[in-house]
Amino acid sequence: MLKVTDLKVNYGGIEAVKGTSFEVPEGSIVTLIGANGAGKSTTLRTIAGLVKPRSGKIEFLGDDITGKDPSYIVSKGITMVPEGRKIFPDLTVQENLRIGAYLRKDSLEEDLEWVYELFPRLKERSWQLGGTLSGGEQQMLAVGRALMSRPKLMMMDEPSLGLAPLIVRGIFDIIKEINHRGVTILLIEQNANMALQTADIGYVLETGRITMTGTGKELRSDEKIKKAYLGQ
Amino acid sequence: MKQKRYLLYSLVLAALLLAALIAIDNSSLKSSMLSTILQKGAIYALVAVSLNLLNGFTGLFSLGQAGFMLLGAYTYAILTIPVEARSSVYQYFNGGLVQFSLPVVVGLIAAGLVAAFFAFLIGLPVLRLKSDYLAIATLGFAEIIRALIQWNTLGPITNGSNILRKFPTYSSLLFPFAVSAVCIGLVVLMIRSSYGRAFKSIREDEIAAEAMGINLAKHKMMAFCTSSFFAGVGGAMLAMFQQSVQAKYFTSAMTYEILLIVVIGGIGSVTGSIISSFLFVACSEWWLRFLDAQHYIGGVKVPLLRSGFRMVVFSIVIMVIVLFYRRGIMGTNEFSWGAIEKFIKAPFGRKAREEERKKVTTPHE
Amino acid sequence: SSGSPSSSAAPSNPPSSSSNVIKIGIYEPASGMNGAGGKQETLGMRYAHSVKPTVTIGGKEYTVELVEVDNQSDNSKAVSAAQQLITSGVSVVLGSYGSGVSIAAGQIFADAKIPAIGASCTNPQVTEGNPYYFRICFLDPFQGTVMANFAYEKGLRKAAVLTEAGDDYSVGLGHYFSEAFKKLGGSVVEAQFQSGETDFSATMASLVSAGVDVLFAPSSIESAPLIIKQARNAGLTGPIMAGDTWENETIITNAGDAAYEVYLSAFFDPNDTSAAAKEFVEGYTEWLKADNTRLTNNGGSTGVAGVSALGYDAYMVAIAAIEAAQSTDGTAIRDALIGLQHSGVTGECASFDENGDAAKDMAYIKTIDLQNATFKFLQTQSIS
Amino acid sequence: MSNTVLRMEDLTMQFGGVVAVNNLSLEVNEGEIVALIGPNGAGKTTAFNCITGVYEPTNGQIFYRDEILVANYPQGKMKKLYAGENAGKYTKVVSRTPDQITRMGIARTFQNIRLFSSLTALENVLIAQHLHIRSNLFGATLLSQLSFVKSKARQEEEHMYQRARELLVEVGLEQYENEVSGSLPYGIQRRLEIARALATNPSLLLLDEPAAGMNPQETRALTDFIVEIKDRYKLSVFMIEHHMDLVMSISDRIYVLDFGKLIAHGTREEVQNNQRVIDAYLGVAEDA
Amino acid sequence: MHDFSYYIQLLLAGITVGSLYALIAIGYTMVYGILRLINFAHGDIFMAAGFFMIYISGTTSIYVSLPIVLILTVVLGVAVERAAYRPLREAPRMSVMISAIGVSYLLQNFATYYTGGLARPYPVIPFLTREVTIGSMTVKALTIITPVLTVILVVALVLLIKRTKVGMAMRAVAKDQSTAQLMGIKINNVISITFVIGSFLAAVGSVLYFSNYEQVTPMAGAMPGLKAFVAAVFGGIGSVPGAVLGAYVIGICETFIKANNDYAIFSNAFTFALLILILVLKPNGLFGEKLAEKV
Ligand SMILES: Nc1ncnc2c1ncn2[C@@H]1O[C@H](COP(=O)(O)OP(=O)(O)OP(=O)(O)O)[C@@H](O)[C@H]1O
Ligand SMILES: Nc1ncnc2c1ncn2[C@@H]1O[C@H](COP(=O)(O)OP(=O)(O)OP(=O)(O)O)[C@@H](O)[C@H]1O
Ligand SMILES: [Mg+2]
Ligand SMILES: [Mg+2]
């Protein structure tokens, strides 16, 4: 579904991504794990069109989307839950959700119900301004917002960041559920353990390069990974 | 080791500059466009640096600079006009109320102090305001000051709407340079001190700065008063340069002009402000003047050229600079010998240029 | 040699050697608050130049070259503008419209020992204490008194004096009018407005309710129509008076029907029957029509503004002085100016007094003729 | 009682209709690491903000050692709005600005990193030392950088630099000294934020989710780091955290908030086995 | 000292001035709220609209010129955005503002260059300048039309911003452009729409304003532009009703001060003093958004 080939991205003089290649098959959950600063977020931002790559190619459903406008990429069916939530502080919770479906022309009520069902907390707060939500609430909102566009591929940048343990587990359940509904997931997580449990395929990104790949299970039992990322 | 070498370079450069200035001062060039532009450039450099201290380093968006210059210019003029000249200057006010006159240096310092004092007064209520709210409040303050000075009732002191003149001016080109250099030097030292770092932290994030124990009110006030002090001194020197001073020209347009200089030079770069002051003054008042006159090339009239065209071209030049040097001439960088050495050492300076280009194309968020 | 239609002949036929060129500086605003008036004054000078492009010194014919700078009506730009003229090597300077910039540059011309001839700057401070500044027009104390006399003689007793704060011309002239009017026995209500003001309705309402029977409002060309119209709207039916700046046809165009009973003091009367004036008016009008840019700079009309006539005279005085001095040297020309006599289209333009002010003892009082949309000469007035 | 560093009494913070913190009382003792946990939106960060002067609480008071840090009671509009317990108990109003509180010896980090992002790591740390500066503006301007004058201000400036570099070495960030802090990796930024807080010389350190965004291995390193700095700088630590491995391995005591109210409090074991905590927050036991 | 009708007359004058400021301020605050750009050129676009009317009405009838002027002004506004603001989307805020000052200089200087700088009479638009009598007073029709139009426009704009998808997109873009992009919002389009609305309002404002004062100069936009800025801040950045209220407060205060001859020159000063006072009491303006920033 998504194919990234030899992607290189620079921030000024710094080379943040140094030639990564990976694939996301349709219907799967793929996770990218790696240390801080490995270039995970940059990769996602580049796919979403927020950062222009220096070289490399990004194909989505056979369509070359390298360096295209974010709005074009969204219209193709890719959304992203950005790192740090980035919800709109002046918009109410409901408006935040609605704006997630900006490109859609059909009725949103059904999807709103679904999101509220996933996150009952949001329903309670649907008139509160996004900016005053607690960290965890904001994270729920960011995921909900991304779902509203009915994406084919949803990229999530550390969705469990700052969430209570109960919710973290919930989030991974939700990811699975979303996936069951036919949404392909590309996930970045620091909580590598949970991520690899959830994912079909995992890639390990180290200083801008993919160094290892395998199914979630394989990686979870790899000694090196255990030591470096699972804290065992 | 390196430090010493750079210090040597700096001393040599300073000496060369001084020699050049002395040479101009003692030659027929003394009364020339070059000298005029250099004087005004030096004065504007001080004012621009003072605004940069506020806008660029402390993150306080102030549009009151013309008001503080006005205060400085008037304070200087009022205090230093010779007693015997007062009756002709204050022609409608029987020679005015002030019947003494102070030495030039005292007048200059008083100019700064009065500006700083008013900054303190206005700062108490308005420095709590954020961004544009602060901008409009300071802009408004400058307008209030101007209206007060023009008020006929204060005429015996300010001469109301009428021009002030006959105050002592300088005779050597070195004077504005010396005063500006000393003042800018002080600003640079301040920026590099712990207080300067505190100013920068306020620019970066007020909440975090406060959490680091920095008293926002106090530090903003320090920056504001200091900036106004130097704006006041700059205003006084502008009065000396013009040999006359009248409140109606210290409008927001003057503040915008200084803001333009700061931004074109690079917000947060002292060197940038200085360089762009000279360029700006030269460009607006010297180099483009030919555009105002009709010219003939081989008997054919050059189209478009007529009075007013210079200002059109000048506006376009400003736009072009702003559009192509988004972060100003210097960005937030300062002049450094290290950078220059690197530039020269790289083969034909290519590498340095390449790096520069990379910087420009950086995608920013 | 009247009205040769070609513009500045000098640049198109560059002189073979620079030794027989003499430069005259035109120090006028072409932008800023007084840009419009400055352009009209400049037109008069350019026309004069086209009429008399050469001058004979020591039996040799010199070509006059005009060097124009824009002082932007701004004191802080005035210094470099003046310096530009000095650097270009001018022998004498003409201008400026707007007294402030003239005062600001006065010392610079004096330091460079280059005489300056003010055409329409009426503030006393321009020439006072400056041995190099001369002026061919009358002064504000004179003008203010003239208008006060005129108003009082018309039987008006309560005057509103409306001036622009911060503008020395406006405030100064208003001051002299008030003084004279009060001395005559009239009473005065003073009011001020800020530069750039467009809404005078409240001011006018208060003046009308104070029961004034005449409004004296020396102000800029831009404010004039606004003042006239809004005064009429507020119900002021009495005369509206002002100084020389109001003699500008755009005011009539812009103020329209409201501009009845408007009186002003002027430097010049285009319908003057004297031969010199007639020749000037005809020639100048032709010259204006010959070029669109000139028309634009004259506000799109062919009317002869008083400042253009003064500009013409100022140039002619300069030429006369150069010829009298038989030198291109600034100080020599200055010395020649001191004793010079010159009768121009606006009357006596020289015979300077100890301050350097011409012996103008007469102002033209004009009114607006709405039917023909022109200024109509009413009477000459002097102070006895 | 003298070994109580922080004491919070009946703290309430209400935003319009939302009672973010509801009648909360707690203590932090000298040398302890105390954790504050609870579901998202329970009011933990809000409690921190009340302590550090960012918010003025609706009711209640907070002591730092034996001094009142903040005290307030419902007044004005709040009087009508707030009808909670102990609303009439307090009559004193003390409100200090965040900088005063920092000066008293409390330093904090932020849930969403707030470094001075276009300044270098070193500058960030230097700025945090500014609160202790002795020289005034003129002294600092004129004397602190002129190498040919030996002055107090100069010594002070040199000392600040020396101290800042030491600190960076101590927290293991020396290689980032001259890097612009905003472009540092996330985990490094978190560490730098702690270093910056330490530079204010606190005796109580408030950490708001220090391990957010860190992988388990990094979290473990952070755990050691917290213990280490606690011992080295003789700190008491009060932290908010969702990483249970971190919380459970180093906290001496734990407070659990839900909907602004304290639902449990005690040692790790007590809290871990508290059914209310499991229901509201922990869920079924970790299976990592 | 004065009778009642005198004060009514002043009040009416104040409301007229206030309404004219309000019309300009609405357009100003739109751009301001969304781009956080102090659009110094707004007043000059307004001035340009005045000259468009003068030149176009010289060749054709008023009723044909009106729509052409509206269109030309919108084109000018959007062109300015394209040329001077869009390339600076990622540059520091200050640079964009400087670019706006540059555009303002350019428009003023070009107008001076092109028109010669003298005031030009504004064509008479009969249905605006026609006199109408209410009670004992005769006023120009625009005195009544302007406030009504202002109110209608405010309601329309508030609905647009609060209730429509475009409005929501505008608010989102105002806060965070890159995240807005992630939602599929084409920020360039949203910003262009904002400029279309802003310039359209400037054009409408210019027709009414210049019909009242009947002349245009190259500097004619500077003062109204500044007043609009003040009004926008007064009411709270980005708040359309706030800007309108601010404009009325300014218009009415100014008028009453100007009626007092001794202090007339303090009318601007007083307005600013009042503004400073209000800001000290309400640091985010009258209707300023509550800071949603959470620490
Ligand atoms: N805007 C930026 N400007 C300059 N450098 C940047 C920028 N954003 C990221 N970097 C650098 O690019 C590299 C990769 O960063 P990225 O955010 O992609 O890492 P990451 O794998 O997502 O890490 P984390 O787990 O901390 O989120 C890092 O070294 C970082 O310092
Ligand atoms: N400034 C504010 N205005 C209105 N409501 C607020 C404000 N700050 C916080 N709240 C509300 O108070 C509640 C507590 O928020 P707080 O940030 O303290 O939660 P938290 O316990 O830190 O959660 P998390 O672990 O997710 O960060 C939330 O419901 C939040 O929406
Ligand atoms: Mg990341
Ligand atoms: Mg929190």
Image (cartoon, coloured by chain):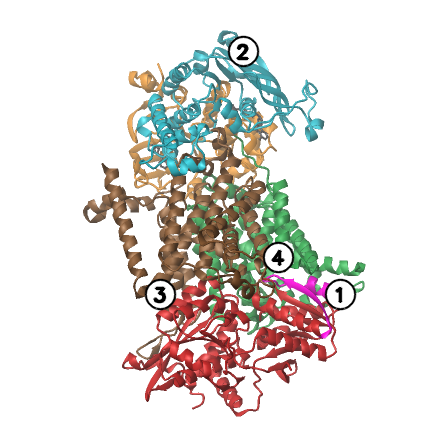
Chain colours: A orange, B brown, C red, D cyan, E green
Q: Which residue is mark 2?
A: D2
Q: Secondary structure at mark 1?
A: loop
Which quadrant of the rendered structure holds the C terminus of chain B?
A: top left
Number of other residues with Cα within 10 Å of mark 2, as a class: few under 14, some 14 to 19, many 20 or more: few
Q: Position of residue D71 (x, y in %)?
A: 62, 22
Real-space Cα distance between discs 3 and 4? 37 Å
Real-space Cα distance between discs 3 and 2? 77 Å
| Residue kind at label 2, given as amino acid type | Ser
**Would you place residue A28 above or below residue D226 in this image?**
below
Q: Which residue is mark 4?
A: B154
| Residue kind at label 3, given as amino acid type | Ser
**Would you place residue C144 above or below residue B277 in this image?**
below
Please give the label number shown on residue C210: 1
B206 and E240: which one is in front?
Answer: B206
Q: Which residues are magenta?
A: C184-207
Q: Position of residue A215 (x, y in %)?
A: 33, 22
Check chain identity for marks 3 and 1: say if they share one: no
**Whether label 2 touches label 1, CB < 8 Å:** no
* Res D184 visible: no
Q: Position of residue A74 (x, y in %)?
A: 44, 40
Number of other residues with Cα within 10 Å of mark 3, as a class: few under 14, some 14 to 19, many 20 or more: many
Chain of the residue that carries numbered disc 1 in the rendered image: C
Q: Is residue C177 left or right of residue E185?
A: right
Q: Which residue is mark 3?
A: B31
Could you tell me which residue is drawn at 30 percent across and 31 percent down?
A208
C51 and E43: which one is in front?
Answer: C51
